[in-house]
Amino acid sequence: MMSITPIELKLLLSDPAIFLVDVREQHEHDEYNIGGLLIPLGEIVSRIHEIPTDQKVVLYCKRGIRSMIAIQKLQLKNPELNLFNLSGGMEAWKTSC
């Protein structure tokens, strides 16, 4: 599984080839987010059609666990997706950015 650090992601945020997916719950997204499309983990497989196949897709959650699970589920359905996990999730993002 490929991953990206918060610092690496921050440097790439202006790149239109990067697509963000937040797999947290609505209330977590409302409290703090970095602009990603909200698709809670429980909905990730049924909403796979919303995830582009022609971009690097960075998935994130609070600590990086749910996003790893989401990536595993998505890769089973579509191995062509270019998925990255945000290491440490939003907790790491807040402390390093």
Image (cartoon, rainbow, N blue to C red):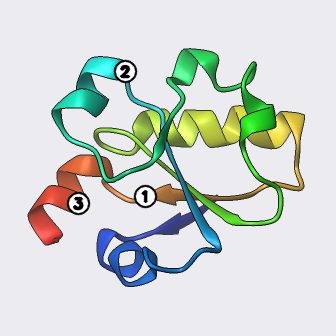
Contact between labelled residues 3 and 2, with CB atoms less than 8 Å apart: no
Secondary structure of residue under mark 2: loop
In 3D space, how far apart are the residues under numbered discs 1 and 3 (Cα atoms)?
A: 9 Å
Q: Name the residue under label 2.
A: 25
Identify the residue shown where x is 31% and y is 53%. Answer: 34
Return the disc, 1 or 2, that comes first in the chain's sequence: 2
Identify the residue shown where x is 65% and y is 74%. Answer: 17
Residue 14 numbered mark, or none: none
Relative placement, left or right, of 90 versus 42 is left
In 3D space, how far apart are the residues under numbered discs 2 and 3 (Cα atoms)?
A: 17 Å
* Amino acid type at image mark 2: Glu
Q: Name the residue under label 1.
A: 86
* Amino acid type at image mark 3: Trp
Q: Residues within 10 Å of mark 3 (few under 14, many from 20)?
A: many
Residue 84 sits above or below residue 15 on the image: above
Residue 18 sits above or below residue 85 on the image: below
Q: Which sits in the foreground, 69 or 20? A: 20
Relative placement, left or right, of 59 versus 75 is left
Return the disc, 2 or 3, that comes first in the chain's sequence: 2
Secondary structure of residue under mark 3: helix
Q: Mark 3 points at which residue?
A: 93
